Amino acid sequence: MYAKSGAIRINGTPVPPPDDPRVSLLDLLRETLGLHGTKKGCNQGGCGACTVLVDDERIVSCLALAVQYTGRDVVTIDALAGEDGLHPLQQAFIEHDGFQCGYCTPGQICSAIGMAGELERGVPSHVTSDLSAKRIELTDDELRERMSGNLCRCGAHNGIVSAIAQTHRAGQLSPRSSTKARRAAR
Amino acid sequence: MKPFTYARAGDVAEALRAGAAPGAKYIGGGTNLVDLMRETIEQPTALVDVTGLSSDIKRLRGGGLLIGAAVRNTELATHREVRTQSPVLSRAVVAGASGQIRNMATVGGNMLQRTRCAYFYDAGGSRCNKRNPGQGCDAIEGFNRTHAILGASSACVATHPSDMCVALAALDAVVHLDGPGGARKVPLTELHRLPGDHPEVETVLDRSELITAVELPPLPWARRSTYRKVRDRASYAFALVSVAAALDVRGGEVRNVRIALGGVAHKPWRAHEAETALIGGPATTRAFRAAAEAELMAAKPLHDNGFKIELATRTITAVLSELAGGTR
C-alpha cells in the first residue's frame, strides 16, 4: 500500500503528484502548471472541454484525481503542435471553420485523436452494426457518435466533423503526427 | 470537496484492510464518485484506489468469462469474446456515457454508480431520502418524467442509471465479492436492492466489502442477444427505457429467453413475468407484446412518466421481434 509513487509525465516532463488528493488532473494542469490549453467547461464530465490523452487514451481530466495518474503519460493540447507547425488536425480545424469561440476546441482535438486510436484497436460504438467486424469504417454516423462526449455550444459541429474526417482520411489523426508530440510521448 | 486521504491498494487483502477504516471508500475510475464528492453528497475520509486490482478477462473452464472489477468499460465492450458471445453486453456498455468516460470507468464502479435523480443531486435545495434518510422525497410530487415505474416505494422513485448492469442482469451474471467475512458470490439481480423504506441502502454489500469480479456463466444461445436504449437524444444520455434481451427460437417456438429492463426501476429489472409467459410458446410479435404487457402489469406511473409503460412494452416487443427475425 502506498500513498503515491513516482511522477506524472505531462507532455514529456515528470511532475510530482499534488500533496492534496482533491486536486483534479485538470486543476493540476491549469492551476499548478499553468497549462491553460486544456479547458474547464462543466467540471462534471458532461462537455468534454477538458479532454486529454493518457497513454494515448482520451479521458476527461475534470473527473480524474491527479494522484490516480502517477506513472502515466499525459499529453495535452499544448504539446500537439511541433516546431514544424500545427498538428494536422489543428490546421484542419482552421480550414474547416471547426470552431467559433474556441473554448471546446482543445478537448475536441484531443478527443478526436484518442478516438482514432480506439478505431484502430477495433473498439465498437453504439452505431457499429457488425460487432464481429475486424475493421470499422469511420462513417459520418460513427464519427458523430464517437465524438458525442464533446459539446460545442457555438454549433460548429459540421466544421468539426469535416475537419476530423479529412484528417482521418489523410492518415494524420494520431498523437504522433507532429514532432514535438512525438518527442513528448517518446 | 471534503479532505480525504488517498492510498492505492496493491492487492485485495490490502484493499480490504484499508477499506475497513471508518469513512473509507473504494475508488475505481472516479467518474461518478469524484462528481458526488464535489457536490458533497459523498464525503469519504479515505479513498482506497482499487484500479490496480484484477483487470483481466479470463475464460472459465466449461465456458463463461470472469471479468475483473478493474477492467475498464471500453476494454469490456471491445473484448472479442464479449462481442461475439454476449453482444448484448458489448452493446449496453457502448450505449452508456461517452468515449472518454468509458475509458476511465471500471466494471466494479459501473455497478456501484448512483442514481442521476436530479433531486438526489440537488444537495442544497431538495429533499431526498437517499441522501438524507427520513427527509422526504421531492421527486414523487416533482418533475418525475425520468423516474421509476416498477418496484418504487413511497420513499424513493429513483432509477439505477447503468446500462451495463441491465445486460449483466439478462445474462445471469454473478458478482464476486470479498470482505472481512470472506469471499462470496451474489447474482447481479440480487446485488442491488429495491428502495423500500431504506433507499439509502442500495446494494447488499456489507460496508467494506469489495467487488472483485463479475462472472458470466456460459449461455451459448446469448450469441443472439442485443440491447436497445431509448433516450431523449441520440447519444450520451441516460435511458428513459432500455431493454437487454437474448432469445433462443427453434421451429417458431421460444426455447429460452432472457429480458432485463433499464431506466424503469431502482435496480436493473429482470423481466421474469415476461420470460415465463414466453417460454414454450410461439415466437410471434403478438406473443412478445402480450408478454411485455404481462411484465408491465405491475407498473405504477407517477405524474410525468406514464409514457414509460407503453414505451417499455413496445421496446420489449421490438427487441424480441428483431432477435426472432434473425432466426428464420
Image: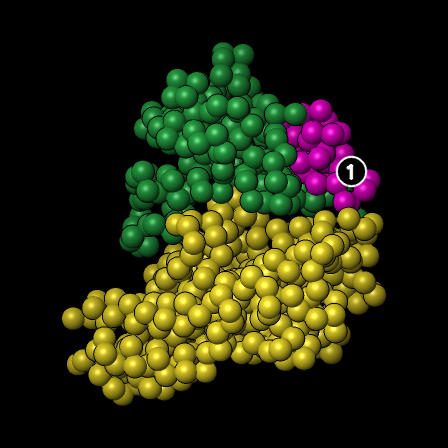
Pinpoint residue B322: horizontal percent, then vertical percent.
25, 66
Residue stretch in magenta: A6-35
Q: Residue at x 48, y 74 (%)?
A: B301
Chain displayed in yellow: B
Is residue B67 toward the left or the right of residue A4 in the image?
left
The one of A171 and B233 positioned closer to us in this rendering: B233
Q: How many labels does the image show?
A: 1
The one of B151 and A35 positioned closer to us in this rendering: B151
Q: What residue type is labelled 1?
A: Pro
Asked if one can make out residue A61 in the rendered structure from this viewpoint, the answer is yes
Parent chain of label 1 = A
Magenta residue check for A21: yes
Chain displayed in green: A
- Residue A106: which quarter of the image? top right
Name the residue that disc number 1 marks: A18
The one of B206 and A27 positioned closer to us in this rendering: A27
Vertical relation: B207 (above or below) B235: below
Q: Residue at x 76, y 34 (%)?
A: A16
Pinpoint residue B21: horizontal percent, then vertical percent.
83, 65
The one of A31 and A16 positioned closer to us in this rendering: A31
Q: Which residue is drawn at 54% across and 53% down?
A: B72
